[in-house]
Image: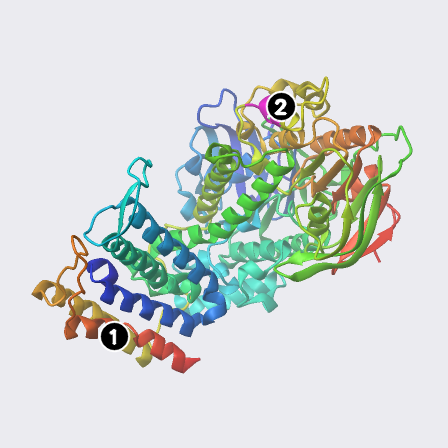
Amino acid sequence: MHPAFHPRAAVAIAQLDHFTYSYPGAASAALRDVSIRIGPGLTVVSGSSGSGKSTLLRVFNGLVPHFHGGRVSGAATVAGLDILVTPTRVLARNAGFVFQDPELQTVYATVDREVAFGLENAAVPQAEIAARVSEALREVGIEQLEGRAVRTLSGGERQRVALASALAVRPRLVVLDEPTSQLDPAGAELLLAAARRATADGRAVIVAEHRLSRLMPGANAFLVVDRGLVTETDPAEWRPAHAPAPPRLHAPGEEAWSVSGAAAGFDGVPVLEDVDLAGRAGEVIALAGPNGGGKTTLLRLIAGLAAPMSGKVTRPAGRIAYLPQNPVALLHRQSVRAEVQFTIDRAGGQEGERPERILRILGLTELADRYPRDLSSGERQRAAIAAVLPGTPQLVLLDEPTRGMDLAARCALIAVVADLRDRGAAIVIATHDEDLQAALADRVVDVARGTLTERAPHELPA
Amino acid sequence: MVVLATTNPVYKTLVLAAALAALVAGAGFRRTKRLFIAATLVAAFAVVLNFVSAHLGATVLFTLPEQLPAVGGPYTLEALAYGATGGVTVAAALAAAAPFSLLLASHEVMDALPAALSRTGAAVAAALNLVPAVGATFVQVSEAQRMRGWRPRGPRSWAEVAVPVVLTSVESSIQLAEAMEARGFGSGPRTHMSPVRMSSQDWVLVIASASAVALFAVSIAAGWAGPWAPYPVLTAPPLDLRPLIACILLFTPALQWRSRS
């Protein structure tokens, strides 16, 4: 492979030369003969789930190979330090990192202390820490959150705290690994704007994302990772790809479920009040709106997982399929096929239903005998969807099903949902994903501050 | 420490009362209600377990037929008293440890640790942050499995929920460790954003608590707080003014925090 030279290579902040890496025990390399140079400005990294994108990002701060182990050849440097011989905890002063899940990178309970954690580790003198924390919070536009409890923040705010924590150490390079995968559109936009601003002062910022349309206009370089190979292309040549909308085979039928004058919430505090909504067999309703607006509560109310505080909920006779947020958490059987079979068996073993059908639609046939937790993140997501959605459920409820999914996984999900719809299932999807809404939704309902507002699928929210 | 060092139920009860009073004074009854319920349930379990399983002692209250497996035999006042002492021990230990999570943020505990324990403390603080995530995963997995047709039928059926929750928790812990490594944790001596500054009230509290522990340790060594056992015949526990004073000193936090609020 020819080295993909960065246009701003004259001042490379990080560099990989013929870098090859294999995880411990892996038969094939996760990164193969990678030669790239990262200069100042915004570098966008794209690639399907399991392509080696996250592995590549973890090279820049030495998590690969120091934390994960494995075999390495070639050379890698960041800020002039040899990554292969410098521990991650030392590289951390030159390469900040923001992970995908905001909850799994928090150490302290308050925002200012959380941002100070990296500075304390770097033994920055106590007299300087408070000023550096304030500066970092200002840089990402969340100075108003100083002193707040981290647990009270939204996902978007938490990710900006994570970015501020990385910037506070004043690294030459900041790496963000799918930082918006768990955020609503508004939270994602604010985070990415902060990431773009962080390129000031000659810093390099690398962002890996599946949704590129928000990032590409400001990108200085574009790296595509495919089965461990990394190539650089001109950001100006990038064109957005959309998931295709499968044609509908039947018009929606009779009313299948309804919520009438219902209130629901937690610990006696209503999140939804006086809600009315109904769906028909073979109809797809998308629930949109900001995080915390009540979408999950409405889904749980329809599913029967939350009892209405007032009002009435009707459901169809037969099975209800429910895909929660983070569905990979429920995977634990010895194979993907066994996960699917479990649901089929518990659903009463519908005549002729075999796991192979949904595995084929989701492109999992070749992985059917693999242990689900050994799969890549995108494959795991598809395995979880297969585990929840086999057979012919009468009501299908999906909570943010495309979180962190690449385009191939989104297309597979759309195919499964369209198949269920055409077989007469009533479907409700809580989703921020405008592609998913456009491909599947017959109606879009905005859920915000506990109330519902209906709009046409392509109409923007009020 | 005091509650674990003695078998005397009077001293144990005083420690429990001091811990509960401190909690209510510091956090209010509403925030501590769940802990009260949990401590009561755990203590009740200890009482019942000993009462049902230990058929020792002279004062028989009633007898179940010996043929009954596990529960058959005499039920004695002594077994009840010993179980109650065990229950008070567990409840007091829970209540004494609770201020660390109910009254203090993780960074406050960290800041108060000596430098040698700073790294361990940070790791513990981070691990504690995972506790709510584990709870949320449990709720989510049990609901999702229920919707897939799973029903709780005996202890073995809970593997369908417990195994994925444990696997997810282990993966979460690894991710958190990776994130801490990526933030330079363990790279050498650390500094603190705001080191703890002790007020005069804090020193009063430290001195009172240290005196209580020291006086109680001396009391045990000198035989002033001798051991007590309900078997074979229940007797009143021996009392001495010196260990009593030690226990009363443990009410200092409750008095201080009450006057502060």
Q: Secondary structure at mark 1?
A: helix
Furthest residue in direction bottom, as rendered: B259
Could you say where residue B28 lies in the image, as x and y percent from the top left? Answer: 46, 72
From the viewer's side, name the closer residue of A306 and A127: A306
* Main SS category, magenta section: helix
Q: Which residue in the protein does label 2 denote? A: A341
From the viewer's side, name the closer residue of B178 and B239: B239
Q: Categorize mark 1 by other alpha carbons within 10 Å: few (<14), some (14-19), many (20+).
A: some
**Magenta part of the chain:** A335-342
> Amino acid type of disc 1?
Ile
From the viewer's side, name the closer residue of A406 and A343: A343
Q: Which mark is nearer the camera, 2 or 1?
A: 1
In this picture, is B186 found above or below A168? above
The disc numbered 1 marks a residue on which chain?
B
From the viewer's side, name the closer residue of A31 and A12: A31
Going 43% across and 57% down the picture, which residue do you hit? B38
> Amino acid type of disc 2?
Gln
Going 51% across and 59% down the picture, which residue do you hit? A168
Q: Is residue A433 visible?
A: yes
Q: Are marks 2 and 1 on the same chain?
A: no
The disc numbered 2 marks a residue on which chain?
A
Could you say where residue B64 lies in the image, as x and y percent from the top left? Answer: 31, 43
Q: Secondary structure at mark 2?
A: helix
Residue B248 — which label?
1
Going 60% across and 68% down the picture, which residue do you hit? A144
Could you say where residue B171 lies in the image, as x and y percent from the top left? Answer: 48, 39
Question: In the rendered image, which quarter is residue B148 located in?
Answer: top right
Furthest residue in direction left, as rendered: B222
Q: Is residue A151 magenta?
A: no
In this picture, is A18 found above or below A255? above
Residue B36 — which label?
none
Q: Categorize mark 2 by other alpha carbons within 10 Å: few (<14), some (14-19), many (20+).
A: many
